[in-house]
Image (cartoon, rainbow, N blue to C red):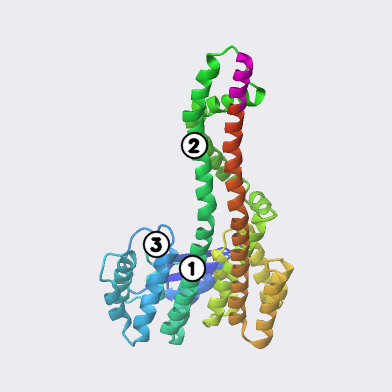
Amino acid sequence: MTRYAYVAEAAGGAVIRGRVEADSERAVIDALSADRLRPLSIKPLRGEIRLGRRTASMPVTTQSRLVKRLAELLSSSIPLADALALMGRGEAQEAATARSLLASVRSGQDLSSSFALLASPPPAQLLALVAVGEETGTLAQQLSRLAEELERKVALRRDIIGQLVYPAALLVLILLTLVFLAHLVLPQFEAVFAGSAAVPPPETRFVLAAGRFVREWGALFPLAALLLVLVCVASRRAYRDTFDSLLLRLPFVGRILARSEAARFCRALGALTAGGCGLAKALPLARQGLTFPVLRRRHANAADAVRSGLPLSTALGRETLLHDEALQLVLIGERTGRLGQMLLQAAETCEAEVTASLKKATALTGPVLTALMGLLTAGVIASVMTGVLSLNDAVY
């Protein structure tokens, strides 16, 4: 009996990885087919070693550094084992990963199987590209192409985070300003009005009451926010499709999320097909990077249509998974035989639109939050001063 590692597609479109003992590869295919699984990749495991319990997926920054360094070494005609040994020197996370890969390779595994056996394995797209490179003898080229895609992914993520830092900082400043006014400023005026027989104006009473509410119940606000988050998470788990569908239909946020998912899918599928992976095998692997299950199912429907003979651009358009410009690029790729390159270009157009939308939102959100902070501060001060003037009127 030989132990095999397999990657298979379930009926719902999910990609499943596992290991099984069988007499032959044919027996593995028959066993998977009996379980209604469509095999994508089957490889024998030689001298399998245990590298720990599988946890979360490998961070994308670690993937980028690891793949880039390995591609550079392999492009210099350094053998795989020697390259991993060089990368394993150090205490960084990628060095520890390289040492684990080296132990697996020296036990007889190929690189793609070694990646799959990691405690924190990389995504299925990376495993597929590595496997294609090993089968075609172009591992260094595939890793170089993969490193470029991962660097773009890291750069896009940093750009998005950078766009959100300024609005988040302004929001925190607004909250701190409200806390400062409620705890240090308003109590001083409450003491003034408490010692006077004059009745403050309505706006002053409202501001003082709001300050007391913040002082008395403000400590519970973080707990209430946490409870709200937990309720939202539980609701999404219970009603995932409804929750995600509503989120994707939101006027501005839904458009950004849909374009981000489209960019992620096109980049993964483009990298796989440009690397030599067949379209039937690449489609289920590419959609595993999507965040929303409802979109994964729609992509699974499109993949079924492609397997039945429908062009990719038509199948994706019928499920409204890409906008018109991206669909045109996919159509051009199909007609010119450059599908991988056109998919990568479609991903760049989607990413550019996401970045531009975020920049516009940030450019608008900054002044709005600044004006809101000024209005809140000015409103509190004006309300208090109105009350002070009413005391003067009561005296005279």
**In x, y percent, where is residue 132?**
48, 80
Q: Which mark is residue 222?
A: 2
Q: Residue at x 62, y 80 (%)?
A: 342
**In x, y percent, where is residue 48?**
33, 69
Would you say the residues marked 3 and 1 are in contact, meaning their CB atoms lie under 8 Å apart?
no
Q: Residue at x 63, y 15 (%)?
A: 394
Q: Which mark is residue 155?
A: 1
Residue indicated by mark 3: 120
**In x, y percent, where is residue 344?**
58, 77
Q: Residue furthest front?
A: 396
Please give left or right for residue 330 compared with residue 273 in the image: right
The secondary structure making up most of the magenta span is helix
Mark 3 or 2, nearer chain start: 3
Would you say the residues marked 3 and 2 are in contact, meaning their CB atoms lie under 8 Å apart?
no
Mark 3 or 1, nearer chain start: 3
Mark 2 or 1, nearer chain start: 1
Residue 389 on the magenta segment: yes
Residue 202 on the magenta segment: no
Would you say the residues marked 2 and 1 are in contact, meaning their CB atoms lie under 8 Å apart?
no
Q: Amino acid at mark 3?
A: Ser
- Magenta segment, which residues? 386-396
Q: Please tell me in which quadrant of the rendered image residue 140 appears.
A: bottom left
Q: Please tell me in which quadrant of the rendered image residue 90 appears.
A: bottom left
